[in-house]
Image (spheres, coloured by chain):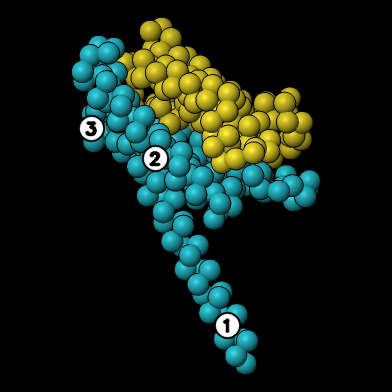
Amino acid sequence: MDFDVIIMNDGAIMKNNKIYVFFSLHILLAVYSLSGICGKLAAAFEVLSPGFVLCYGGLLFIFGIYAICWQQIIKRLSLTVAFANKAITVVWGIIWGYLFFDEAITLKKLIGAALVMTGIVLYAKTGDDLDRDEGGVEQ
Amino acid sequence: MRFLAYASLMIFGTFVSSIAQVMLKKAAMKDYSSHFREYFNPTVIIAYIIFLGASFLGILAYKVVPLSMGAILEATSYIYVTIFGVTIFKETITKKRIIALLIILSGIVVYALG
């Protein structure tokens, strides 16, 4: 009976941990999407002007953080789930574009974005099939 | 026409960064004598320099391309990754994967028309 309790506790801890990692992934993807804002801001400056260097520096800083954290997340989450959720960056791009750069949101754009996201999720899911078919190991 | 040129620049930047991704994967498949070597070896360093160049191309493209379109065009990376996977890493390609890529492509076209 003691043994059962241990297993149950273990399961609960793992489940909580998964949610925590999943949440971290989405925080990371939201932060990553901010690099787009830096890039778009940098584009308005002359190359190598102070404003450009500041924005480009910000972009590279975010890339660095992203690269480090992404490695930690895919250690704890399946690559399929991680890549499928990356589709959310499309939504962030639309939100930041609308909020900061007055980019219009049209029905066609929303449909197009939904298609792209569907494609990304499907693509990531077929990676799961490939791994199973080939008995492959997740990187 | 000008828009198309800048959009192509962003697509090219995505292609270039996919090459860097392949290099990182190649590097990750090797065994290294130390953690230091795992990160500081020619392949990884060159890959990161290529990433740097690709991000610069992305910024140039943003002079004309809307921010919201950036992530959309970056989705073309799945096409390159698939091509590299088949040609370099001898991965198999499934019908589902081709369908997924076609859906991504159709989404990009619909978005561009919007």
- Classed neighbour count for the residue bearing mark 3: other residues with Cα under 10 Å, few (<14), some (14–19), many (≥20): few
Mark 1–mark 3 Cα distance, whole angstroms, equals 51 Å
Provide the secondary structure element on which disc 2 rests. Answer: helix
Label 1 chain ID: A
Q: Which residue is mark 1?
A: A6
**Image-quadrant location for residue A52:** top left
Task: Work out whether mark 1 precedes mark 3 in sequence or the reverse, and give the earlier one.
Answer: 1
Label 2 chain ID: A
Q: Quadrant of the N terminus of chain B?
A: top left
Question: Which residue is rendered at x = 77% and y = 31% of the image?
Answer: B90
Q: Colour of chain A?
A: cyan
**Which residue is more in the foreground, B24 or A138?**
B24
Task: Work out whether mark 2 precedes mark 1 in sequence or the reverse, and give the earlier one.
Answer: 1
Q: Is residue B109 above or below residue A121?
A: above
Q: Which residue is mark 2?
A: A65
Q: Is residue B72 above or below residue A126?
A: above
